[in-house]
Image (tube, rainbow, N blue to C red):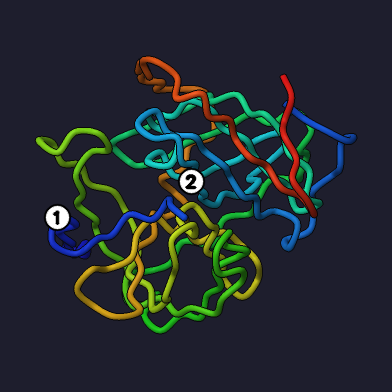
Amino acid sequence: MWWRSVAALFGLALFAFGGSQLGEPWVTQPEQRPVAIAVLPCSTAKQSTSSGFVVDDRTVVTVAHAIFESRDVAVRDAFGRWHRPVIVRLDLDTDLAVLHVAALRAVEFERSAARPTSDWEATPATMLGGAASGTLDAEIVRRVRIVTEVVGDRDRTSSRSGFEVALDIAPGDSGAALVDDGDALIGLVFARSTRREAITWATAADEIETGSGQLPAWECGPSFGAELELRAGGPTRLAG
């Protein structure tokens, strides 16, 4: 059996810390696909930042753990414009979220070609536009079967296809795209190892489903009175 298991309970650090304005840009070049995602969690008045990318027309993919149990979410595109998304999928088992952003348009993100497991070893890769670290060179260490706790439920685990990656990410980079040397999508960065230096885990691109789907419900309770502070060259608030 070619899958190798990775017990995330003993080696993952999830990173998601740290309506549209101004026209409808077409986002078609690889360097224009990364987005930053600002989130106001239910549990605190302090907002957090994560990463994401435009995978096809009007569709942004990111990590579910950044969005789950949030009070407000906004997406900043490559042009510095803020958009209010609609959450259309939030899969807590695979830690994947899909957002609909009407003003973001792109050709479909080509996915990296399938290959035998051993062929992934020492494959050059790039993390594309992480919200904290920007674009970084990386290397695939191996393809693995990742076992993690389900987001929001420590009593359950789930598994999915993924990669162990030689890459040092920072808080805010979770959700960034991992691409090959042809700018095709390999996967999505979601966590850093807590035991090994400069090792990151990524969910494989073939796990990403971009249609509408699971959408768990949650209640935030009383408001803290806080609002998202959105910056694009200066203090900006997203209205509406």
Look at the picture and state if 152 lies above or below 16.
above
Give residue 91's position: percent from left, percent from top: 37, 32
* Residue in the image at 52% along x and 49% along y: 49
| SS of the residue under disc 1 | helix
> From the image, which quarter does the C terminus lie in?
top right
* Residue that sits furthest to the front in the current view: 225
Q: Which residue is mark 2?
A: 48
Name the residue located 21 percent from the left edge and 65 percent from the top edge: 2
Relative image position of residue 68 (x, y in whole percent): 39, 32
**Is residue 217 in sight in this rendering?**
no
The amino acid type of the residue labelled 1 equals Leu
Give the residue furthest to the left.
155
Which residue is depicted at the point 46% across and 43% down? 208
Which residue corresponds to the image point at 80% horizontal and 54% vertical from the top-left? 233
Mark 1 surroundings within 10 Å by alpha-carbon count, few (fewer than 14), some (14 through 19), many (20 or more): few
Q: Earlier in the sequence, mark 1 or mark 2?
A: 1
70 vs 86, left or right, is left
In this rendered view, identify the residue nearer to me: 204 or 199.
199
**In terms of depth relative to the viewer, which is nearer, 188 or 20?**
20
